[in-house]
Amino acid sequence: MLSRVFTVATLVAGLAAGLCCPAWAQDLEGSADHPLIPRYEGSEIVGYEAEAFTDYEFRTGKEASTGTTILEGKLARITYRGPADRSVLEVFRNYENALAEAGFETLFSCAKAECGDVPRTIESGPRYMLLWGEGDHRYLAAKLARPEGDVYAAVYVTRNGSGGPAKGRAMVQLDVVEVAAMEQKMVVVEADAMRDDLARGGRVALHGIQFDFDKDTLRPDSAPQILEIAKLLQENPTLSVLLVGHTDMQGGLDYNMDLSRRRAARVVQTLVQEHGIAEARLQALGVGPAAPLASNDNDEGRALNRRVEVVKK
């Protein structure tokens, strides 16, 4: 059974009483259970990663090309080595029940051949303990809706067919993403600075225009930067510009091209409708990931690549 099955309400009570998530002598140093999802009783943490803000390819189908959703937020990856003489199915059903009782909604569940290429996607990188599964694997993708941000959990259970202490044991990969917007720390570029950059190089990159994740909806914290674009155009009445949307390399090319175009068009619409800028002076374009400013191999580079540029016509 799982060490302790918690609903969100009983989890809070357990934390207050100091009863949740006991320390295990064989756990990897510095690791910990996720506070929303307990471990299967007798399991040990053998792999652990935690990131305050990153992107994650969340599998919701058997084929990566059609069953992948990109999430952004706080990520915990925990690899458990199960106790001896416990089947993959028994461990998996315990996690399935615990997630349901905690209020998670199942988005996708599969077993063995039904999982398609899910095992190949998960059995990679530092999760080496999962590489020797003998075909008995099960996967569950679930979502917990919360006002402060949704939580997504991916549970993958397989049997280790290698030697050593994990031989024959059920192995669990638990990945939990707490969706949240990135803290905005980009400086607003003022109208005078934009005018000077346009005079020197013909374009200026703006990172202060932010959108809801995977949408073309402007976030409220974009207002100061859009106001500065409006001031630039009001103070320079003969200036016409392109608003060019850029994305990082995450996701499909066609999708990113369309998303970047829609985001640029949203900026144009806002300048016209809310700031009275003549539509004839503005043109929206989207180039997706085609013109990166930095590497797409890390979070910092991807953040720089997601931007709107003002280009002088």
Image (cartoon, helix red, strand yellow):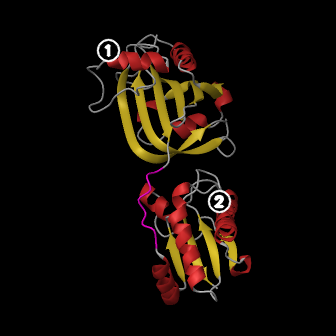
Indicate the position of residue 219 as horizontal and vertical percent values.
Answer: 56, 55
Task: Please tell me in which quadrant of the rendered image residue 223 appears.
Answer: bottom right
Q: Nearer the viewer, residue 178 or 110?
A: 178
Q: Which mark lies nearer to you, 1 or 2?
A: 1
Work out whether residue 66 can be spotted.
Answer: yes
**Proximity of marks 1 and 2: CB atoms separated by less than 8 Å:** no
Q: How far apart are marks 1 and 2 (CA)?
A: 48 Å
In reply to whether residue 187 is colored magenta, the answer given is: yes
Indicate the position of residue 163 as horizontal and vertical percent values.
Answer: 39, 24
Badge 2 amino acid: Asn
Q: Is residue 90 above or below residue 132?
A: above
Would residue 261 be found to the left or right of residue 50 on screen? right
In reply to whether residue 136 is colored magenta, the answer given is: no
Indicate the position of residue 60 as horizontal and vertical percent values.
Answer: 64, 36
Q: Which of marks 1 and 2 is nearer the N terminus?
A: 1
Q: Is residue 120 above or below residue 42?
A: below
Would residue 62 be found to the left or right of residue 170 on screen? right
**Residue drawn at the location 62% of the way across and 65% of the way down:** 288
Q: Mark 1 points at which residue?
A: 17
Badge 1 amino acid: Ala
Q: Is residue 203 above or below residue 226?
A: below
Task: Please tell me in which quadrant of the rendered image residue 119 appears.
Answer: top right
Q: Which label is found at residue 68?
A: none
What crowding class fits label 1: few (fewer than 14 Cα within 10 Å), some (14-19), or many (20 or more)? few
SS class, disc 2:
helix
Q: Name the residue under label 2.
A: 256
The secondary structure that dominates the magenta segment is: loop
What crowding class fits label 2: few (fewer than 14 Cα within 10 Å), some (14-19), or many (20 or more)? many
Work out whether residue 21 can be spotted.
Answer: no
Q: Which of 21 and 79 is in front in this view?
A: 21
Residue range (magenta):
182-189
